[in-house]
Image: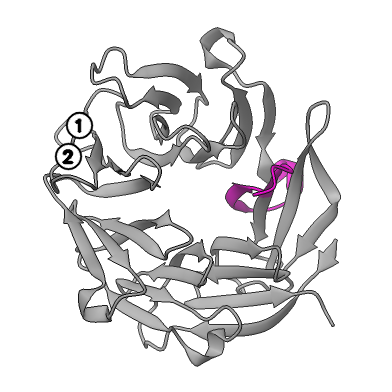
Amino acid sequence: MYPLTCVDGYKIPLREEVYVLDIIPFTSGPTTISSDQKLSLFNPTSLSTGPLVNLVTNHGNITCARAFDLGSATVCTAGEDGSVSMWDLRQDPRQAEVARLTDNRYPVLSLACSSAGFSVVAGTELQNHEVSIVIWDVRSTPTPKLHYKEVHSDDVTELNFHPSDPNILLSGSTDGLVNICDTRITDEDEVVIQTFNHDASIHHAAFLNDTEVFALSHDEKLALYDMSESRENGAATTDFGDMRNVLGCQYIANVFSKANGAGAVIGAGALEDEAFQLIHLTKGQGWNLDRDSSVGLPGAHSSEIVRSFAFYDEAQTVFSAGEDGYIKAWRPSA
């Protein structure tokens, strides 16, 4: 394992406990959402000076955020009151909220955005025996263009667009299914074009490339699926099982595909050891864990969970965010 050094950090200065919930890796710098309802953009070379932009969101309780356009610093946020906001972080803070998408009354748990498809999608919590995937076209009215109510039978915990086709949407749910939907289809009976059965509540799921998908359950089971292969009952092509046993960790924060197509990175934490590792998932003949080239963040976020991480390869920097209220920057030792 190759250890990085913590070179910078910022802690939200509040007496009450605040979690940093997620990091969005904008070109201009890492942007966080936190449990004090803030959306914050940081200078990637100077976290400790505090946020360059610090906006108060208004969702009752913020639950998720996604980049609409990584290059232009446009981001969507959503929360428990069902609202979805679009923000342009380059604007004056008083005009930064550039749109508010309406007509959803259920708490939002997941978001996906496609600037190529002009689409924002929200996945809701199960309430009143109803769970929704709501799609807006940001060029038109603030009311949804599509509203699917039968794609899942429980909370929609994850949404992600296909890397090259903005019409194809992945959804994951606590019902244990990962569905692939064609959003050009309005008929609920036809919209799901493929289903993968992870058989455990979905925590995270996304495309690794044009055909392959990963799914990670809330009980840390990781498996890979392939849209180009038809398997009985939507079975996995590679099943790694419980990653706590495989990696000797206590939790998986997330899995992110590498921008250059060279596999993916798994973020694994161990609270008792105050440790967090980035482990490469590489593809040769099949998918394998490359334990020898793993990267460590010694001390991590003390005994608190690392909620999110982001890597800026060109700057040789990893950012991490945790339930200790910190965002930290890590680099190789000089």
Picture residue at 36% right of the left edge, 60% below the top: 75
From the viewer's perspective, tell me whether residue 259 is left or right of residue 197.
Answer: right
Q: Secondary structure at mark 2?
A: loop
Look at the numbered discs 2 and 1 and tell me whether their residues touch, using CB distance below 8 Å.
Answer: yes
Q: Position of residue 131 (x, y in %)?
A: 23, 33
Give the image quarter of residue 118.
top left
Label 2 CA crowd tier, 10 Å (few <14, some 14–19, many 20+): some
Q: Position of residue 208 (x, y in %)?
A: 61, 37
Residue furthest to the bottom in view is: 49
Q: Nearer the viewer, mark 2 or mark 1?
A: 2
Which quadrant holds the C terminus? bottom right
Q: Is residue 247 magenta?
A: yes
Give the image quarter of residue 176.
top left
Q: Which residues are magenta?
A: 245-265
**For the residue marked with disc 1, what is the amino acid?**
His
| Residue 146 vs residue 157, the one in the foreground | 146
| Residue 42 vs residue 279, the one in the foreground | 42
Picture residue at 84% right of the left edge, 65% below the top: 2
Q: Secondary structure at mark 1?
A: strand
Picture residue at 46% right of the left edge, 88% below the top: 50
From the viewer's perspective, tell me whether residue 105 is left or right of residue 35.
Answer: left
Q: Position of residue 203 (x, y in %)?
A: 47, 42
Q: CA distance from mark 2 to mark 1?
A: 7 Å
Label 1 CA crowd tier, 10 Å (few <14, some 14–19, many 20+): some
Q: Which residue is mark 1?
A: 147
**For the residue marked with disc 2, what is the amino acid?**
Pro
Q: Which residue is mark 2?
A: 144
Q: Indicate which disc residue 325 carries.
A: none
